[in-house]
Structure formats: structure tokens, C-alpha cells
Image (cartoon, helix red, strand yellow):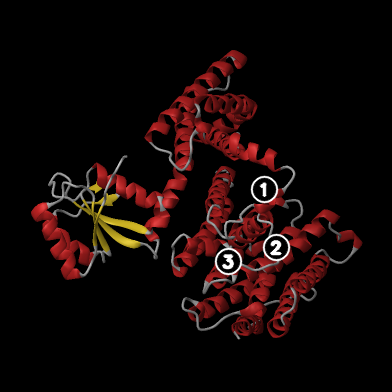
Amino acid sequence: MGGIAIAGATLTGFAAVALTGMALPIAASWMFVLAAAVAMFVVGVFDDRLQLSPVAKLVASLAIGAFLVFALAGGEAAGALPSGYTLIGTVWFAGICHAINLLDNMDGLASGVALIAAAFLAFLLGAPLGVPITVLLVALSGALLGFLHWNRPPARLFMGDCGSLFIGALLGGASLAPVIHTRIAFVSPTVLVCLILIVPLFDTAFVLVLRRLAGRKASKGGTDHVSHRLASLGFSERSAVRILWVFGLIGGLTAWGLVAFSAVEPMLPFVALFVVVVILFGIYLARVPAYDAKDFAAIQKSSFAPFLKDLAFRWHAGEVLLDLVLIAVCYYAAYRVRFDGSSLDIFIPYFTATLPVVLGLKLAALFASGLYRRSWETFGLRDLTVVIRGVGVGSLLSVAALYYLNQGVGSSRLVFALDAGFLMLAIVITRGSFQAMNLVAATRNKRSRRVLVYGAGAFGQMLVREFRANPAWSMNPIAFIDDDPMKARRWVVGVPVRGGVANLEATMTRYRVDEVILSSASINGSVEQQIREVCGRLQRPVRRMLMDIS
């Protein structure tokens, strides 16, 4: 009944505003968008009652989308869209409908993400949408906000397919209207809409691509969505839902930045960085098992498997393409920081002209430095020297080449210094991103035992690193206890030292420790006896790390 409540509340809110005197032009976009949403609601009701096949729902959404595109374009030859736009618009409408439907796999997820998307669409695209569609989106936001009170974990009300398809149709139809009506600026509204709807788009594309690579049917359901993989990493359902809410909020704020600052500050580099973050997030989640060790079965059985394997694993094509984007963005950012106003307009042509040289030389320097032979999983201080060498040599080669080719015209030493710093920071952040994600997942894992390590020396640090690197152990290091007063109240390998043996019982109680591990054979005698007495009172096990090389 939740979907009926959402649709009813949206229509009631819209009607209430209309009755106050809002001008409602006849045969306008709002009527067609609303009609498409109601039609998809009816399809959802039939699906909830009769269990329609996935193909039937897909055909219905494509048919309704085609009529919507025809109506929005004016329905006449003079206003007809190019055939490519018509096909894209039809598929877009159906895709958003099913993206919201697929996203409804955890309590509060689809409703929260749709609420954020509807609010940003109404706020950022109100003028091209027109007042009626904007009011529709505001009414939908209010309905979703009321529904979310009952749908948040643990949910007591569910939207069903009638609700998710109605929401998807309203968002899909509303997002089509400004794109079709501003054909000269076709790309700009599209970028905004994609950023606002990043969560459903990303989740649907992620699932479809990985199911195809795993040799599974795209229409076959499963626990392989982004939210499910976050849960597999150890996040609670509430945490997984909140992460995706934040993800949608960041997409909306990026779209707002494009609208608010593009006139004075080109925002495309920031959009590019956001896309890089999304790709890294997707690559990381794709590594989470979801198909019973049969991931990428389709690739392994295909005739071009050796080529793909060689391309992906030997030459690290993904890393090279990522660095290509980072080099361009950092080089542009250096120009933006060095020059501003009218001087930027003078020097931007030099940036455009010299970019190919900088790209080629810096990629070659990074390759020669050995960066692409380093693993992201173990990226550390030793790898930092490789990054410094690769970026430094690439910058020096770029300076030498540009001074040789252009005698330094249009160049700036400060630009190259800023560019080197930005690129070094970007490479370190991207390479260290997997370790950062692993650390967040390990510390937030609700299924892991909360472990206190006694002894913050070399063995204790090795234990903590192993706990984080080996999720199969299901151990989350919460704190160290160490009798060395120089280590007290400090952080060692990212874990706080909470004092000595006198602080053991208070620390275990405060941090709800499940287990204590003695990290060294030197922890014995009276100290070990005290530890075991405290753990005995709190009914917590004590174990000791043993090392044996034979």
C-alpha cells in the first residue's frame, strides 16, 4: 500500500496547489509527464497483483516512454526530434523507471535516493521544467518524506512496484522535459540530470555490466546490487543506505556547483574528478564476491579472454586511462590557479596546444618509473618514491620539450610546479583509495569481533595490519594496550593506545571488546596473570600470537 500512498499524496499535493490559482496550461509538458507516471503506476499495480514478467514491464515502459517523447516534442513534423534523440529519450524513460525499481532492495534506499533526486531536480531545473512540473516534483518530495518515516529501517510500509515505477516515471519524465525543450543546450541539462540521478544510474549500470560479465541473465534478480555489496563488506543495512544517500547528495551538490559557478569558474574538471571517484568506487565494489566464485565467467569462457586478460592485468589499461584523465585535470587546474580573469582567456589556448605533449611525456615517465608494476592493494611509502620519480621526470621532460618547441611562449614555471604537486597528490590518493576503502569497511564491519591487542610493538602492529588485510579473520582492532608510557594516548598504525594494564578493564568495557590478543611472548608473568584475571571477570577470551618458522 506504500506505493498507493506515495502516488495519492503526490497527486493530492499537486491538486491542492493547482486549486489555489496556479496557471495550468492545457496540453503542456506537465500533463504528459503526469499521464506517463500514472500509466506506469497502473503497470505497477498489475505487477504487484499478477506478477508481470520482466519483459512485459520493459515493453510497457518503452511504449509509454515513446508516447511521452512524442508528446513532449509537440507531436508535429516541425517539432520532431532527431531519431537518435527519440530513441535515447525512450530508453532513458524506461531505464529510470526500472532503475528506481531495482534500487528498492533495502528499507529506505529507493525512497531516500528518490527524495534527494526530486528535490535537486525541482531546485536546479525549475525554470526549464516550468511551474507545474516543479510543483509535481515538490509534491513527490513531500510524499517521499512522509513515506520515509514509515519505510526507514526496520520498515513498516513498502512501496511495491506501483510505487517505484510511479516514482521512476515521474523522475524520468521530468528529467526529459528540459532536455527536449532546450535542444541547443542538449548536453548541459543531460549532465545535470545524470549527476542528480547518479545513484540509480550507477546501480543499474553496475548490476547489468557485472551480470553480463558473470554470464548471468540481466533480468534475473539477486543480491549483487551496490547496497548488497556494501552489506557484504560488513556495513549494516542502515549504513549501506546512508552511504548511498550521501552518494546521491554529492551528485546533486556537484550539479548545483555546475549551475552556480560555471559562469565564473568552469566546473568540468570537478565533474571529471567526481566521475573518477565513481569509477574507483565501482571497481572496488566489483571485487566483492557476489556470484559464488563464478564472477566474470562469461569473460573467462569467451574467445577473446586471453586478449582481455593481457590488456587488463599485464598492461593495466584501466590505470593508464585513469592517469590520462588525472594528468589532463591537474594540468588544467594548475592553469586555473595560476591565471584568472582575462589573463586566463589569454593563456588557455596555450594549455590546449601543449596538452598532448604533456600527456605523452608524463605517461611515458610514469611507465618508465615502474608505477604500473605496483599493486594498489599494497601501496605504501616505498611506492611514493616511484610516484615522485615518475611525476618529477615527466614534469622536467615537459618543461624541456615545451621550451624547445615553443621557446617557453605561453608557459609558466609556477604552472609546472603546481601541476607536479597536483598530479602527485592525485596519484597518491587514487592508489591509496583501495586501502582507505578497506580500512573503512574493516572498521565498520558489524560481523567482525572487536579485538584489543596487548602490545603496540612490531608484532602488535603486524597483527593489526593482518587483521585489516585478511577479512576472512573477521577481526576489527579497536585499541592497543601497552605499558610503555611513551606510547600512551598516541595512535599506532591507525589504532589508539589506551594506556597500560591499569586501563585494561575500563578500555574493554568502554569499547565493548570481544577478545584480547597478546602480541608478544614477552608479555608473561604477573602482567599476563592480571590480563587473564580482568578478562575472566568480563568473560572475554585471551589468545596469544605465536610465530614459527620451520
As drawn, the label of residue 300 is 1
Counting residues from the start of the chain, the first of labels 1 and 2 encountered is 2
Q: Is residue 493 visible?
A: no
Give the crowd class for mark 2: few <14, some 14-19, many >=20 residues within 10 Å: few
Quarter of the image for the C terminus: give it. Answer: top left
Q: Secondary structure at mark 2?
A: loop
The residue that label 2 is drawn on is: 218
Q: Note whether 94 is above or below 82 in the view shown.
A: below
Disc 3 residue type (three-letter): Thr
Is 523 situated left or right of 424 in this image? left
Q: Secondary structure at mark 3?
A: loop
Q: Residue at x 43, y 46 (%)?
A: 435
Q: CA distance from mark 1 to mark 2?
A: 18 Å
Q: Residue at x 19, y 51 (%)?
A: 489
The residue that label 3 is drawn on is: 223
Q: Residue at x 54, y 16 (%)?
A: 400
Is 405 situated left or right of 176 in this image? left
Single out the mark in the foreground, 3 or 1.
1
Give the crowd class for mark 3: few <14, some 14-19, many >=20 residues within 10 Å: some
Q: Note whether 1 is above or below 540 in the view shown.
A: below
Disc 2 residue type (three-letter): Ala
